[in-house]
Image (cartoon, grey):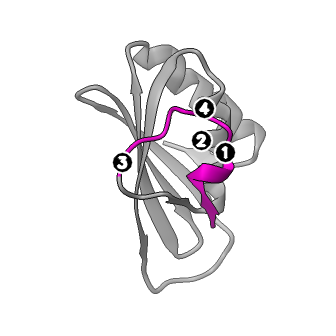
């Protein structure tokens, strides 16, 4: 896990500062985008399951941007992405996720 303070950006908000590895990779990319105004990581949840190395990113629209639910092995985390340009940011997430070998839905 990484803390958001280790990512050079002033776009982070919210109470939670830890990111699971898969979320960190995507958030690093989004933090550099001019289209994103703020990023708010959510709580990390763990559940019992197989540790098959799966990495999935579910993308959904939110009132003020995009909500991504990142699943990595037996952990998941929701991250809110605030933007006025929802479709271009969704496309960026999909493109960069697929380049990294993550499944998107």
Q: CA distance from mark 3 to mark 2?
A: 14 Å
For marks 3 and 2, the one nearer the N-term is 3
Read off the residue under disc 3: 14
Residue 94 seen: no
Earlier residue among tags 1 and 4: 1
Q: Nearer the viewer, mark 1 or mark 4?
A: 1
Distance of label 1 from label 4 (alpha carbons): 8 Å
Q: Does the CB distance between marks 2 and 1 fall below 8 Å?
A: yes
Q: Is residue 23 left or right of residue 59?
A: right
User: Residue 7, position in %: x, y?
Assistant: 67, 45
Q: Earlier in the sequence, mark 3 or mark 4?
A: 3
On the image, numbered disc 1 is attached to which residue? Answer: 7
- Snapshot quadrant of residue 93: top right
Q: Residues within 10 Å of mark 4 (few under 14, many from 20)?
A: many
Describe the element under mark 2 as helix, strand or loop. Answer: helix
Task: Determine contact: label 1, label 4, CB under 8 Å.
Answer: yes
Above or below, comparing residue 53 to residue 60 in the picture: below
**Which residue is tagged 4?**
31
Q: Which residues are magenta?
A: 1-14
| Image location (x, y in percent) of residue 65 | 35, 26
The verdict on residue 7 being magenta is yes
Q: Nearer the viewer, mark 3 or mark 4?
A: 3
Q: Earlier in the sequence, mark 2 or mark 1?
A: 1
Q: Nearer the viewer, residue 75 or 10?
A: 10
Residue 27 got which mark?
A: 2
Q: Does the stretch in magenta take in 36? A: no
Q: Marks 2 and 4, how far apart in space?
A: 6 Å
Residue at 67% of width from left, 52% of height from top?
6
The chief SS type of the magenta part is: loop
Q: Assign the N terminus to one quadrant of the image.
A: bottom right
């Amino acid at each position: 896990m990484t803390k958001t303070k280790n990512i050079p950006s002033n776009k982070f908000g919210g109470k939670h500062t830890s990111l699971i590895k898969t979320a960190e990779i995507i958030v690093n990319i989004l933090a550099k985008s001019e289209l994103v105004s703020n990023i708010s990581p959510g709580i990390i949840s763990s559940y019992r399951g197989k540790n098959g190395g799966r990495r999935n990113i579910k993308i959904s629209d939110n009132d003020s941007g995009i909500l991504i639910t990142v699943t990595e092995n037996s952990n998941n985390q929701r991250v809110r992405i605030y933007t006025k340009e929802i479709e271009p940011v969704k496309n960026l997430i999909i493109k960069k996720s697929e380049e990294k070998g993550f499944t998107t839905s």
